[in-house]
Amino acid sequence: MPRSIFNFRFVPLRAAWGILCLLALFASPLLAATKPTTATHAAPASPRFNGNLAYEYADKFVACGPRWIGSPGHLCAEKFLKQHFAKDNLEEDTFTSSTPIGPLTMHNFIVKFPGKKDGVIVVASHYETNYWLRNTSFVGANDGGATVGLLVELANGLRGKTLDGYSVWLVFFDGEESIKSQWTDSDSLYGSRHLAAKWERDGTLKRIRAFLLTDMIGDKQLDISREMNSTPWLEDLIYKAAQQDGYASYFFERQDQVEDDQLPFVQRGVPTADIIDIDYGPHDATHPDGYHHTAEDTMDKISARSLTISGQTVATTIHLLNQR
């Protein structure tokens, strides 16, 4: 999981709802004559996202165990991705990074679904777990596992056809986590830094219309932040998608500035959004940072319902991007 720089919580929308309802009750007689009669939200034209399947995929993926680079669990994770996308246009991007423990071979995976419009929408997740937690039972159910399941299910709505809109590429980053326990600019984001530089050199970045990073959005207590390093118009579009599907109350009650796999793309001018729920689990003496990077980040802490909300919002955002 990435590093959070700071956050600012808005007045909670759910807490304010009762007050707004009372105001609406007294104001309704005055507004009745001018209230629009047309529907506020149209039904989405995007495919319906199956959060139950996404949860099942995540469960099977997390069963690989800890996925630190070079571990049996990491090899299992690679095999999982290769098997699920064996009949798709799957590209394995293998590279070697200099790390605090020496050179490590890492693997990004890119799955490409072609579209009719000129341009690409990228949806991404990281898939490994922390090397410095290798002697614990940390399996990253929400921190990497949930969004792998989300992307695998998203592919089910893309597969077997030429998309009417932009091409959609699913990216699974390796090496998002730091090798040492202290996160630094040089010891983190290995896969995204490598791929952003590679795509800058070969001209691919110019084709990307939007880069949607997903991280930690299977949390049962879903509270997706407005991420302040992200592109404002793209964040606005995500909120519009959430409104359209009736999920706006799960989005943007707080703002956070997060260092995550979006940064190498932000720094190169790509329209980017980090869709993330950084507030994961209780924060108390036992859990100073919630379930983040603890052995308690397990499948029982995430839900199919949250994956439905997150996945459908991503699918609707892709639909809205195609309409621009």
Image (cartoon, rainbow, N blue to C red):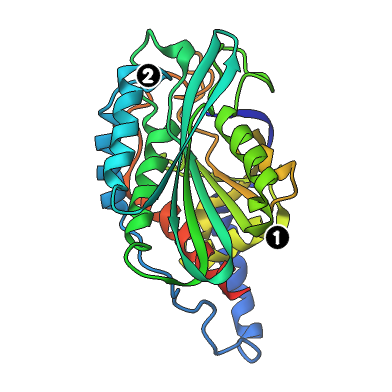
Q: Secondary structure at mark 2?
A: loop
Residue 102 picture quarter:
top right
Q: Nearer the viewer, residue 187 or 276?
A: 187
Residue farthest to the front? Answer: 202
Residue at image mark 2: 138
Looking at the rendering, in which quadrant would you find the C terminus?
Answer: bottom right
Residue 159, position in %: x, y?
Answer: 34, 62
Q: Is residue 75 left or right of residue 31?
A: left
Give the residue type that dot 1 points to.
Answer: Trp
Q: Residues within 10 Å of mark 2 (few under 14, many from 20)?
A: many
Residue pictured at 28% horizontal, 46% vertical: 84
Residue pictured at 55% horizontal, 14% vertical: 103
Residue pictured at 65% horizontal, 60% vertical: 236
Q: Secondary structure at mark 1?
A: helix
Residue 11, position in %: x, y?
Answer: 65, 47
25 shown above or below 215:
below
Give the residue type that dot 2 points to.
Answer: Phe
Residue pictured at 36% horizontal, 69% vertical: 161
Residue at image mark 1: 233
Q: Nearer the viewer, residue 292 or 115?
A: 115
Residue 208, position in %: x, y?
Answer: 63, 57
As measured in the structure, the alpha-carbon distance from the residue carrying label 1 to the one carrying label 2 is 36 Å
Q: Residues within 10 Å of mark 1 (few under 14, many from 20)?
A: few
